[in-house]
Every structure is written in C-alpha cells, then in structure tokens.
Amino acid sequence: MARIRPVSTMRPIALALTLAMATAVQATAQTDVVGTLQHGGMTRTYIVRLPPGFVAGQSRPLVLALHPALSSAASLKATSGWDAVSDVHGFVVVYPNGGLPSGSNGNFAWNSWDFSGAAPDDISFLSALIARMNADYGIDTCRTYMTGFSSGAMMTNSFAAAHPEKLVAIAPVSGGWITAYGGSESQLVPNLPVAVWTWRGSNETFSTGVGTSSRSRTQQDQEQLAYWVSHNHATLTSTQAEVLNYGVPRIYTTSRFDGDAPVWFTEVQGTGHIYQPGAADLIWTRCFSQLNSRAPGCDPCNATANPSLPDCDQDGVGDACELAAGTQWDVNGDGTPDRCASCPSIATYCSTSTTSNGCSPQMSAAGNPSVGASSGFLLAASGVEGQRQGLLFYGLFGPKAAAWAPGNTSTLCVRSPLQRTVVASSGGAAGTCTGALTLDFQSYLAAHPTALGQPFQPGTIVNVQAWFRDPAAPGTTNLSNALQFKTCP
C-alpha cells in the first residue's frame, strides 16, 4: 500500500488569524467504541472514535494513534487532539493499548524495536488491528496512517519498517530511535517508501535509551531523520519557520525533503516531551489527508496505469490526474500544473467582490519577483473603496474558493496559513472606487525576515489577495480577486 501518490503541496488548516473568518464545525453524533481482540494468547484492547454521521462501509480513512509508555489509549485519546480533528474531517481513529504492562493503574508500553515475533508481538497485533478495523467498519485500506508519542512513536517507526505496505504515512512525535535502545538500523528493512513527518520539542535536551547505547534526544531525532531521508531517496527542498497559535503563539520550524515519498521534520520552539500542540490538526490537514496509496486498486491515476499522460514534474502521476484530484492546480487554465510553469507566471483568478459603493477591486503585478532582489516587484489592488484601511495578504499553499461572510459577495481565494502584510489607507476619495492598496513584495520581505515562506526560494508559488474595510457590507469587510505568481532566481 505504501507507494505514495506524491503531491506538490500539503493543504493546511485555516489558522486563527485576525484576517480569516472562522467557521465552526459542530460534531453531533460522534461515537466511542471500546473493543477487544484476541491475539497471541492475549486479550488486546483498543478504543475507536467514529466521526459524526459514520456508517459502516463508507470507506473512511483510518488513523492509528499510539500512546507513550506509562500511559494508555484513553490517556492519549484525551490529550492528543485527534478526536476533535476526526469529528471535523470525518475519518476513523483507533487508539490501541500496548502489549507490555507499564507501571500501575492499567497503563501500558509497546514492545518497540522487536522484530523477532516474541510475545507480546505488537507489530503483529497492529497488523491484525488494521484488518479488524476493515472487517468491522469497512475503512479505506488505501488511506491508513499511524502516529504515536514517545514509546508510541518508537512503535510507529517499528511498524512502518516491518509493514510499509499497510501504511501510507506515519507521524512519530518525540520518539526514541532504535540505536539508543541496543538495536541497529540494519534491522529496519522496509521494502517500500513511507511518507514520514517527525516531530520534536526544542526543549527535549535529555538523553534516553538503554545502557551505553543511550544518547540525547536531539541525536536520536537527527538519526531518525537521516534514516528516512536515505530510505526515501529524498533531498532537502525547503526549511520554513512559521508562528502558529495553538493556545499560545509558538515558532514551528519544518524542513521538507522530497523523494520517493516526502520526509518532513518539525521542531516546536519552547516545548518539551509532549504530543506537540496542534500536531493532530497539522498532521491530518497538511499531510495525511493529502497522501493516498498508489498500490494497485488504490490510485486510478498512477503512472503505470497511464503511461501516456504528460507528467511535467516527473513525479510519476500524470498532469491531468493531479489536476483532477486537486493535488495540483492550473490557475491560468493552460492544462499544465502551475508548478511546472516558468517564472514569473503571473495570473489573476477567483471572482472579486462588489462593494457597498459598487466597486470591483482588481489585483495586478509589475516587475520581476526575483528572490535575489530587495525591491521592485509591485503588487496592487485598484478600484478599492476610497479612504479605507486595508492590506494585502498572501499564502504559499495554493488557491481556494470559500465564502467570506454570509451575504457578502467576496470570496476567500488563498489557502491558509495566511501572512498579513502592512495595514495602510487606500487613499482616493471616500465613497468612490478610487482607492488602491500597493505593496513592494521584495521590500516587505527584506523588512520581515520571519514572514511566511522566508527565506524564499526560486520556484515558490505565491497567492495574494487584498482585504479592506467596508462597514456597510455584510461582515464589514470585503476582498479583491486574487493573483498568483512564481518567484524567480
């Protein structure tokens, strides 16, 4: 199963930015089911989270979430955030208990890094649990994913190494590596690529492991990253720091490697050994939800089935298939994914609003968006309501089309996370359409080194839109249409 349908971008969740309109999704009929499974002479237990409106046989995705040592399925369920994400996005989560009693009060650990089949054989148990989920609930076997925390992250890596065909992607969070526990990477023999997103907190400076093999968590994470990068034949494509607010603002720094399957590595500033804040949201919306198995019967658009399709980025998936699946986009409508267009590839898209004074603001651009220049690429929204406060905002994860506010004619055309730029007056005359909002994009980046996407690399696709006050409009604000461009060397 683990042949991955590659994507050019991971679609993130909408973050709580002042600019964005939050849409609450209420769960109305989610269900928790406690289950048992006889396996290896033991009664194994687990908890299943079924999303609202679930009907068996609907072929929903499955996420297996593995608890740390001295803990339990119920504890991870209560603290990881996966229930809430499942309720919103409609996938099934199963929280199994490990096979090793750990401490007291019904807590467990996992028999990680043991590929011998000795009891408790947690690798075999998890394989049987996936089969049980399919038998009981008809889950989508082309979309099965695994995450875990600490000991559960170790088990996640162990299972992916043993059965990559059963998973599309994994997300180990703050887990130790095999070399610190007396094992060798030579024991890891996955025969397929696996998409991996590894997480850690910057304050995880302690050491873990067994005897003389013990080493710092930092070293273990670097060894883990290096192993999966090598296995997936991946190379570094970007490192991005962004401020995300999950309770409090924190810096999330993510390095991305592209290869046979993507490898991501995220460090959260100021956190310790925890299931990282917002990890469940981000893992699902940016990674798991965007990856589908390319095993036979799973992906109707894999290159083997469509050898004659043009494939401009040579990722093994035909252009037409990626456009149809929404994993690539084609703003200018030329039939070729925008990722393959030559810079600057400037194009406008999405509908503009009609403001309370009948204005229809339009985006435009002039100059060359060179990452080597410190000024000169000008973005503008003209035809804006005069004498209104407004700004331009941008994103790096593609276009979208979402209603801005009930009764409002505006459309939000940029996929979040969004970077707001500098608030300014539109000028012009009040009550007319003579206002404008302008931005020298390169000058803005030079003055804001931590802005979204910094440091920019050539070939980055940027989507931009204007926002401005319009007190008489529904929601009291309005938006322009949107503009997309591709950065140049």
Image (cartoon, grey):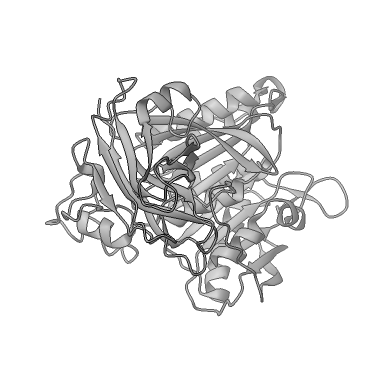
User: On the rendered structure, is 275 left or right of 380?
Assistant: right
Q: Nearer the viewer, residue 90 or 434?
A: 434
Please identify the residue farthest to the left as the structure is shown. 308
- Up the image or down, 252 lies above or below 470; here it is above
- Up the image or down, 486 lies above or below 476; here it is above
Asked if residue 42 can be seen in this view, the reply is no
Q: Quadrant of residue 461?
A: top left
- Up the image or down, 334 lies above or below 426; here it is below
Query: Which part of the image, by quadrant, shows the C terminus?
Result: top left
Q: Tell me residue 217's x, y (percent).
A: 64, 26
- Image mark count: 0
Query: Which part of the image, by quadrant, shows the N terminus?
Result: bottom left
Asked if residue 195 can be seen in this view, the reply is yes
Q: Tell me residue 434's x, y (percent).
A: 35, 47
Report the residue at 31% width, 32% height from top. Answer: 378
Q: Nearer the viewer, residue 63 or 83?
A: 83
Q: Quadrant of residue 344?
A: top left
Report the residue at 36% width, 26% height from top. Answer: 442
Q: Tell me residue 473's x, y (percent).
A: 50, 62
Please identify the residue farthest to the right as the structure is shown. 105
User: On the rendered structure, is 216 left or right of 21?
Assistant: right
Q: Nearer the viewer, residue 305 or 83?
A: 83
- Up the image or down, 408 lies above or below 171; here it is below
Q: Nearer the viewer, residue 127 or 90?
A: 90
Report the residue at 58% width, 64% height from top. Answer: 88
Q: Tell me residue 474's x, y (percent).
A: 52, 64
